[in-house]
């Protein structure tokens, strides 16, 4: 069963990163960071142009997910997978995770998300895949990992949180970059009724998500849970 799941994640995972904690930022630095992350005049320019979203992540940081089932806090370790951690940090900063569906949730395996509900946004990020990270941590329950194709350097924006012990994914190049530290009960309560995605199962078809975005998901999969907002937590 785990082998089947592992192959499914390779084939469907992406249509288509030990240093101590940084010292606390000053109030001025915090204000400047917030301003850079959320420009007053509209969406962050990096949302549609990933070349403008290439900040280096802190060595250790936390992100709060506000979901339709409650809040989840993730602790991200850059030394586990630097490229993945940097990508995740920048996705949060530019506001990528606003009303993003948990579109592939399978009991005992994992819950997958990270496709923009706006096709132009997803297309832009798909054009900027990541270099692979060496796998330093195992895919344990509650660990978060980028999805990938069965080819090198194919990670973009999709990721998953492990429900079970998926150590069989380690040798396939799936490199965890963080873990859930609060709210795993929320993660476990996300809707799993659709199961595997099309064409293998009755869940959403990733090609249609790419083309139609949230319009497709909201119409045909009304029971899905959603990640409404992601925020970098200040010290």
Image (cartoon, helix red, strand yellow):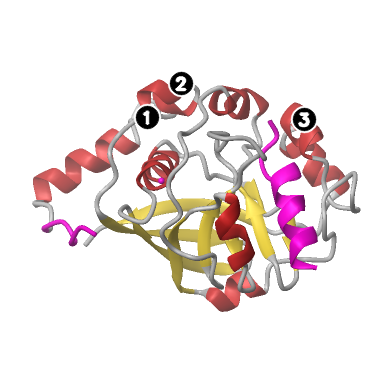
Secondary structure found at label 3 = helix
Q: Which residue is mark 1?
A: 53
Q: Which residue is mark 2?
A: 49
Q: Confirm or deny contact between disc 2 and disc 3 (CB under 8 A).
A: no
Of tags 1 and 3, the one toward the viewer is: 1
Q: Confirm or deny contact between disc 2 and disc 1 (CB under 8 A).
A: yes
Instruction: Pick whichever of labels 2 and 3 is earlier in the sequence.
Output: 2
Secondary structure found at label 2 = loop
Disc 1 versus disc 3: distance between alpha carbons?
24 Å
- Residue 120's image quarter? top right
Magenta region: which residues? 1-23
Q: Is residue 208 above or below residue 222?
A: above
Image coordinates for residue 94, horizontal then vertical, percent: 42, 36
185 to the left or right of 138: right
Q: Is residue 4 magenta?
A: yes
Image coordinates for residue 130, horizontal then vertical, percent: 48, 33
Image coordinates for residue 202, horizontal then vertical, percent: 91, 53
41 to the left or right of 36: right
Secondary structure found at label 1 = loop
Disc 2 versus disc 3: distance between alpha carbons?
20 Å
Instruction: Pick whichever of labels 1 and 3 is earlier in the sequence.
Output: 1
Q: Which residue is mark 3?
A: 212
Which sits in the foreground, 130 or 126? 130
Residue at x-position 39% and y-position 41%: 83
* Label 3, residues with CA under 10 Å away: few <14, some 14-19, many ≥20: some
Disc 2 versus disc 1: distance between alpha carbons?
7 Å
Q: Quadrant of the C terminus?
A: bottom left
């Amino acid at each position: 069963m785990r082998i089947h799941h592992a192959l499914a994640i390779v084939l469907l995972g992406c249509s288509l990163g030990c240093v101590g904690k940084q010292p606390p930022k000053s109030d001025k630095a915090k204000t400047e960071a917030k301003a850079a992350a959320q420009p007053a005049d509209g969406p962050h320019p990096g949302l549609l142009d990933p070349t403008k979203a290439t900040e280096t992540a802190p060595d250790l940081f936390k992100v709060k997910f506000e979901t339709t089932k409650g809040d989840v806090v993730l602790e991200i370790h850059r030394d586990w997978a630097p490229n993945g951690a940097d990508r995740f940090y920048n996705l949060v900063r530019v506001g990528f995770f606003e009303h993003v569906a948990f579109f592939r949730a399978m009991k005992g395996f994992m819950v997958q998300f990270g496709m923009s509900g706006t096709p132009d946004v997803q297309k832009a990020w798909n054009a900027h895949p990541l270099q692979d990270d060496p796998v330093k941590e195992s895919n344990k329950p509650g660990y978060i990992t980028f999805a990938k194709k069965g080819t090198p350097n194919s990670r973009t924006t999709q990721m998953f949180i492990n429900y079970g012990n998926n150590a069989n994914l380690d040798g396939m190049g799936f490199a965890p970059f963080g873990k859930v530290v609060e709210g795993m009960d929320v993660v476990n309560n996300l809707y799993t009724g659709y199961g595997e995605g099309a064409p293998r199962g009755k869940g959403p078809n990733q090609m249609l998500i790419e083309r139609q975005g949230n319009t497709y998901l909201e119409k045909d999969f009304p029971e899905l849970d959603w990640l409404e907002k992601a925020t970098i937590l200040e010290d």
